[in-house]
Amino acid sequence: MFLLDKTRIKICGITRLDDISDAIHAGADALGFVFYPPSPRYLKPEAAAPLIAAIPPFVTSVGLFVNASLEELQAVIKLAPIQLLQFHGDESPDECHRLASAVSRPFIRAFRVKPDTSAADLLECEAQYKAISPLFQGLLLDTFVDSFGGSGKVFDWSLIPKELAPRVVLSGGLSAQNATDAVVRVRPFAVDISSGVELSKGIKDVAKMRSFVHAVRLADNMPDS
Ligand SMILES: O=C(O)c1ccccc1NCC(=O)[C@H](O)[C@H](O)COP(=O)(O)O
């Protein structure tokens, strides 16, 4: 199948070794691992170590943190050398740069979108992080929830400015049922999913992962809306 363009795919909240190969063979370009203890998808660094070790080349390992200390980051990286940081809490631009610099890793910043979030808010956030750190690689746009993320809830994609869309990771409540519509409408650089490909929190469903990738690829082969 000839692809007009290839929307990158991150599958997040991986906790099992078998889910790694299933996700990669389904078409995931990146795998997310949650290092936030209150999450039901949380992995201790020592539990993450064999999972990260099993990831082949050309698949990005992403470590997800919420207001973590440098010591917490260092403890993860020492045992599970993830390639990309995802800051999903209330970390400031300076804090993100300080942490990412200390462990010599690039990072993406989760922006948790609320109903009153404006296009200007999103563009201003990207500009702020770009100005502060060469380690910043982009925004992941997720739905604002009190538990920080992994909610399975969508936000209003029409809030995303057209000029920003090609640089963002679209996240929040995606599934095989809405992914084609989401990608055609937004045309993001990448999509990110957790709940929509699970049997239960942290337990991925290979059939749902395959269906999700297929839905994204359908959009990749459709003309813009
Ligand atoms: O996944 C979690 O449990 C989680 C907990 C706390 C902060 C962030 C979390 N996940 C971040 C992600 O990148 C998820 O993939 C993203 O929120 C989308 O999740 P979903 O809406 O379930 O697809």
Image: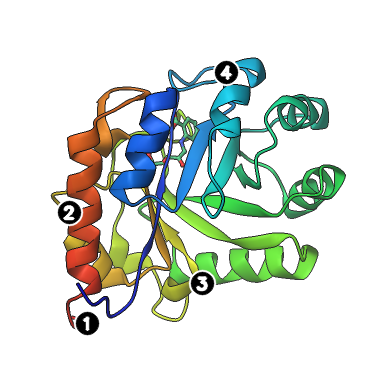
Disc 3 residue lies near ligand 1 with CB under 8 A: no
- Mark 2 residue crowding within 10 angstroms, few (<14) / some (14–19) / many (20+): some
Query: What distance separates the C-alpha of mark 1 from that of mark 2?
Result: 16 Å
Query: Alpha carbon of mark 1 to alpha carbon of mark 4: how far?
Result: 40 Å
The residue positioned 30% from the left and 62% from the top of the image is 157
Amino acid marked by disc 2: Asn
Q: Quadrant of ligand 1?
A: top left
Instruction: Choose mark 4 or mark 3, whichever is in front.
Output: 4
Element on which disc 2 rests: loop
* For residue 61, side relative to residue 83 (left or right): left
Coordinates of residue 225 in the picture (x, y in percent): 18, 80
Amino acid at dot 1: Asp
Circle 4 crowding by C-alpha within 10 Å: few under 14, some 14–19, many from 20: few
- Label 3 packing within 10 angstroms: few (<14), some (14-19), many (20+): few
Q: Which comes before the other along the chain, label 2 or label 3?
A: 3
Mark 4 lies on a secondary structure that is loop
Label 3 belongs to which residue? 120
Asked whether disc 1 touches disc 2, contact meaning CB atoms under 8 Å apart, the reply is: no
Identify the residue shown where x is 60% and y is 38%: 63
Q: Which residue is mark 4?
A: 37
Task: Decide which of tag 4 and tag 3 comes sooner along the chain.
Answer: 4
Q: Can residue 133 be seen?
A: yes
Mark 1 = which residue?
224
